[in-house]
Amino acid sequence: MHISFTALSTTITTGSRWSSPTAGFSMPHCVTLVSFSAQLLTQIFMCSWPCSVIKAAGEACIAFHAHVLKLGHANDPYIRNVMLDTYGKHGPSEVAWKLFDEMTDKKLPDWNSVISGCWKWGNEAEACRLFNLMPERNVITWTAMITGYAKLKDLVSARRYFDEMPAKSVESWNAMLSGYAQNDFAEEALNLFGDMVRAGVQPNETTLVTVLSACSSCGDPSLSDSILKTMKRNGFKMNCFVKTALLNLYAKQGNLEGARRIFDELGVYKSSVTWNAMISAYARVGQLDSARELFSIMPDRDVISWNSMIAGYAQNGHSTVAIELFKEMISTKQFQPDEVTMVSVISACGHLGALELGNWVTNLISNYEIELTVSGYNSLIFMYSKCGNIKEAQRIFYEMEIRDVVSYNTLISGFAAHGQGKDAIELMTTMKEEGILPDRITYIGVLTACSHEGLLEEGRKVFESIRNPSVDHFACMVDLLGRVGQLDEAMILIDNMAMEPHSGVYGSLLNASRIHKRIEFGQLAANKLFELEPQNSGNYVLLSNIYASTGRWKDAANIRQMMRRERLRKGTGWSCVEYKDELHKFVVGDRMHARSHDIYRLLTELLSKMRTQGYSADKSCALRDVEEEEKEEMVGIHSEKLAICFSLLVGEVGSVIRVVKNLRVCWDCHTWIKMVSVMVGREIIVRDNNRFHCFNNGLCSCKDHW
């Protein structure tokens, strides 16, 4: 007899409470029931598959239970166990307990069902009590205990039950393997897999997927190769699920050729997991065109697909594209962004310094009711710090219920960028008091903060407290010494280093030589950098600038000639400001902007007023051997000046002006912005590639120390 499940699923909602004197319990108000004729139900329970119908009903099984009782099938051991198992999976748990307690002849499957239910309800104590009361156990019982403890992340207890099992099935091995793999114990999972092979247990597809996932997590290519050889040697067959796991393994190892080969082999058997793994692999290594190509032809996108692309753009320096793609995602109204989405978008806003966009994204988190974890809050701290709102970053930090080392490091780095050395040191002290040990990143942040505020003695104490300073810590200390003019001491520190100095060390020395015009140290540092970073044009430019600032134009020209010979080009300087959710970008002498005429008119007016107050352009910032009048014109049209004039034209009176610049602010622009902040009565915040400068009433937060 063929019965349509659609016919069985006609639902009604009762307005009264149903009860059965036989069962001794009542159903809650407005329970969804499945309506059947008595004749149809009788036919169902006479056929060979009533249990399948009950399982298929899922949460609506309560309706079947009512009819089971009415038709006198309450004591059928098979139907009774299916009902108990279904209640264990879908609830309500009270009904499951009632049903189990009323059983006078509990069978082994009944015990197993209720134990599995206990783990699903999070009742460890009751699961253990029942396990100890059981008159007999089978492999399903032991496996349920292993799975339950693994879900609680108590792998010690899970392994104890696994080791005590009198006999193990492949499912038992899989339960323990999954417990290790899902809790980031990849090495233990792989060792257990070796034991499984040596025990002669034939792995199934679940085993292989779990093991390959563990290999992906461990990041050890040699270990992965060993596992793959074992699989081939034992003739393990690879279905589409195993191949997808293998693709993911290759992708995480950076073996894009191997990953793509499997991707193409899968043909019509590609799942969304397969597509996402391949897209993520391309995005991770910066092959965004290949990732976008797959993304555009993917038959069924999901949130993970969007997240992979958005994160790929954000992590590879394409923050604007990441935000635009996010806007496209939410405009479809088909996909609900999650925390992973928001972390990528928030980070992109931080890199751009786009505070208005960042506030918009933060509001979306509330609108979508996304619950943030520590990672999400850390991204907010990063974003507000990078957008120049360190107070908001602090507020979020101190309102967090749980903070980790990344939380502290992110805020400390924010203090460093804002030149708040004392705050950074104080926060590290608090960090230690709360039992969180500073790591390498912490000390880099604190030393950088000391450098930006000129706290030499405090920085020395921090440096000396580091048990095993890395080469990065030495670079920070050289930077600190160099900024305060102690270049001789910095050189001694470099000479006495136990490890080989890297480019960061000599880069700090070169920059200090530029600040204090110590040509001999600049030449030494630059020559080392030419060897370490032959393709970094910035080192050539810095040395050329040192020569130019001291009037050694011929030497400066020689450096420029070297750059041309090596086919190196100086990066273009630019400045960005945000207006109405758009970023407006300017380069030196830019006349392509729609408001260029007004911008240059205002620039001329400001310059005229400033001259009456004693301003004259710092022509050394032109760094070229040209006529004095031309030098003044060159420094007068730097990108940050154009960006600030645009903001003065379009922004609200009294609002803060925020500028992001990809190079360091020159001395002339620094002086110019200080004077403008007084003339227009506005706070101007400039984030260059090194730190923040907050200009207000003619003063800068850096105290002219940068």
Image (tube, helix red, strand yellow):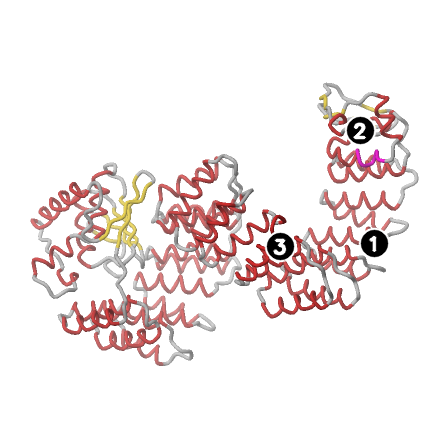
Q: Nearer the viewer, residue 325 or 123?
A: 325
Q: In what element is the residue under mark 1?
A: helix
Find disc 2 in the rendering and name its residue.
3
Residue furthest toward the top?
15
Horizontal and vertical percent for residue 701? 27, 54
Which quadrant is the C terminus positioned in?
bottom left
CA–CA distance between discs 3 and 1?
30 Å
Find disc 1 in the rendering and name its residue.
139
> What are the residue bounds of the magenta stretch?
49-53
First reached walking from the N terminus: tag 3 or tag 2: 2
Residue 393 position (above or below residue 451): above
The number of numbered discs placed on residues in the rendered structure image is 3
For the residue carrying disc 2, how many other residues have a C-alpha within 10 Å: few (<14), some (14-19), or many (20+)?
A: few
Query: Closer to us: mark 3 or mark 1?
Result: 3
For the residue carrying disc 1, how many other residues have a C-alpha within 10 Å: few (<14), some (14-19), or many (20+)?
A: some
Q: Is residue 303 left or right of residue 564?
A: right
Determine the image quadrant of residue 49: top right
